[in-house]
Image (cartoon, rainbow, N blue to C red):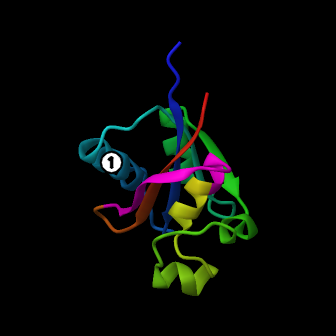
Amino acid sequence: MELHPMIFVGLGFRKAVTIKSFENLIHQVYHLTELPGPIKALATLDTKALDPALQDFAAAKRITLIPVSLENLKRQITPTQSPAAQAAYGLGSIAEAAALFAAGDGSSLIFKRLVSNDKLATCAFAKGSFK
């Protein structure tokens, strides 16, 4: 049996986000790199997890959505330091922090913060344990 690392996608976004914003992010990543495993789950700040566009995207892709508390996001060390995220939430990148938290202890980013073409969403990909 071949083992693949689990991939977790962290997402940050603005209120005006659309499902196309999320689709664009995934499309960009698949055109830039080959992922070492399947996407296991999406993760974002818990207060954003009920956004209709995100819910629709997760349902359409049949991917689990993990809501993460701000407290848990703030515990993650992110390479990106977004002034907007820093001002609004006191952390460097919601997308990177969410991906790292969802992937668990010992995880690492395999794709740092990427911005959608419409500038409404960001994503980051983290590699978690083999399963």
Looking at the image, the residue that sits furthest to the front is 106
Name the residue located 63 percent from the left edge and 82 percent from the top edge: 90
Horizontal relation, residue 120 to residue 127: left or right: left
Q: Is residue 86 above or below residue 119?
A: below
Can residue 6 be seen by looking at this rendering? yes
Name the residue located 66 percent from the left edge and 66 percent from the top edge: 73
Name the residue located 41 percent from the left edge and 52 percent from the top edge: 22
Can residue 51 be seen by looking at this rendering? no
Horizontal relation, residue 13 to residue 23: left or right: right
Residue 112 is a magenta residue: yes
Q: Along the line of sight, which residue is nearer the eye, 33 or 18?
A: 33
User: Where in the figure is residue 44, as x and y percent of width and height?
Assistant: 60, 57
Q: Quadrant of the C terminus?
A: top right
User: Where in the figure is residue 18, as x and y percent of width and height?
Assistant: 42, 56
Q: Which residue is mark 1?
A: 29
Residue 122 is a magenta residue: no
Amino acid type indicated by mark 1: Val
In which quarter of the view is residue 70 placed? bottom right
Q: Is label 1 in a helix, a strand or a loop?
A: helix
Q: Along the line of sight, which residue is nearer the eye, 59 or 77?
A: 77
In which quarter of the view is residue 115 placed? bottom left
The residues colored magenta run 101-116
Horizontal relation, residue 85 to residue 45: left or right: left
Task: Please count the marks in the image.
Answer: 1
**How crowded is the residue under tag 1: few (<14 C-alpha within 10 Å), some, or many (20+)?**
some
Looking at the image, the residue that sits furthest to the top is 1
User: Where in the figure is residue 82, as x and y percent of width and height?
Assistant: 46, 79
Q: Along the line of sight, which residue is nearer the eye, 79 or 27?
A: 79
Name the residue located 52 percent from the left edge and 34 percent from the top edge: 5
